[in-house]
Image: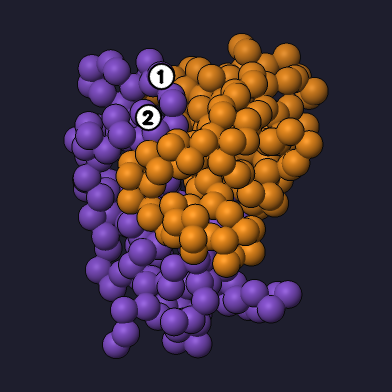
């Protein structure tokens, strides 16, 4: 098995990763995200400390890396729905499934649905990512 | 941690949402890569990006989406974090040096899972270029029992 996955190795129904990915909503992750997006983050400094929903931008990267797409891929579309607030200190479990793949204008697309759940199993976010697969290595 | 629904701040269809403006340079892109763990060379490696479809590095799409989420939270008093939804396509890249302007307008009210929601057309531009196209959905009234 190579470092990266070839487009023809991706199949509808593939679940990634095989076991849900764990993502810890740490203060460091939240602070880094707020700083990098220049978000003053007043709403995220209280006690108990709440995390921005779009910390999803961080856990989605971890999730997408689990597909082992070659470098150079492009994020084409994103749908995401938030189901509840999240707090700093929570542990989330995230998993995705390939629901469609197609080639359009010679570009190889992969469509994946994902869910993020809290430690109690409650749904935190769900959505769909459409990516252009990186060029096969 | 629950927040009020946004009905008190919603006058109706056509309402304009706040404007969030960010200037994105390569330093900001690199900082975002470190924060998100996304070191795709199309974002952080000018040599690699030169051979790609855009000819130079581009910002992460999810970085732009973070600006959108901030704008929607500003408007909704934080309700977006709990019950919001976004559905977008990235239609154009953000290049280093671009100033990105993010806003939206309430297009209509719709029902989602029995709850009245505002459907918001998102407007995200860098100068004359459209960066993304799509909408957000935000509940505006509490569910009826």
Percent x, y of residue B50? 57, 61
- Which dot marks residue A34? 2
Q: Is residue A83 left or right of residue B101?
A: left
The foreground one among A111 and B22 is B22
Within 10 Å of the Cα at label 1, are there few (<14), some (14-19), or many (20+) other Cα atoms?
A: few
Q: In this orientation, does residue B55 appear?
A: yes
| Picture layout, residue A63 above or below residue B75 | below
Q: Is residue B13 left or right of residue A27?
A: right
The foreground one among A130 and A69 is A69
| Picture layout, residue A59 above or below residue B125 | below
Chain under numbered label 2: A
Q: Which chain is orange?
A: B
Q: Look at chain A in the picture and name its colour.
A: purple
User: What secondary structure is found at the residue carrying circle 1?
Assistant: loop
Q: In this orientation, does residue B82 appear?
A: no
Chain under numbered label 1: A
The foreground one among B71 and B32 is B32
| Picture layout, residue A40 above or below residue B132 | above
CB contact under 8 Å: marks 2 and 1: yes
């Amino acid at each position: 098995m190579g470092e990266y996955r070839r487009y023809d190795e991706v199949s509808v129904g593939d679940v990634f990763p095989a076991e849900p990915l764990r993502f810890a909503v740490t203060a460091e992750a939240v602070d880094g995200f707020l700083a990098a997006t220049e978000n003053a983050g007043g709403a995220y400094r209280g006690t108990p400390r709440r995390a921005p929903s779009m910390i999803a931008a961080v856990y989605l990267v971890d999730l997408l890396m689990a597909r082992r797409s070659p470098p150079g891929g492009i994020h084409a579309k994103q749908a995401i729905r938030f189901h509840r607030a999240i707090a700093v200190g929570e542990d989330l479990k995230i998993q995705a499934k390939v629901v469609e793949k197609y080639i359009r204008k010679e570009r190889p697309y992969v469509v994946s649905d994902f869910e993020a759940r809290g430690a109690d199993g409650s749904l935190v976010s769900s959505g769909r990512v459409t990516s252009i697969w990186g060029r096969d290595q | 941690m629950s927040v009020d629904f946004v009905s008190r701040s919603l006058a109706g269809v056509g309402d304009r949402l706040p404007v969030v403006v960010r200037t994105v340079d390569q330093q900001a892109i690199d900082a975002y890569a470190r924060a998100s763990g996304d070191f795709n060379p199309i974002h952080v490696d000018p040599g690699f990006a030169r051979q790609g479809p855009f000819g130079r590095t581009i910002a992460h799409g999810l970085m732009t989406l973070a600006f959108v989420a901030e704008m929607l939270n500003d408007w909704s008093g934080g309700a977006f974090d709990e019950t919001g939804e976004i559905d977008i396509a990235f239609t154009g890249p953000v290049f280093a040096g671009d100033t990105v302007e993010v806003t939206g307008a309430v297009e209509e009210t719709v029902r989602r899972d029995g709850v009245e929601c505002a459907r918001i057309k998102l407007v995200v531009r860098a100068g004359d270029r459209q960066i993304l196209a799509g909408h957000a959905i935000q509940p505006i009234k509490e569910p009826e029992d």
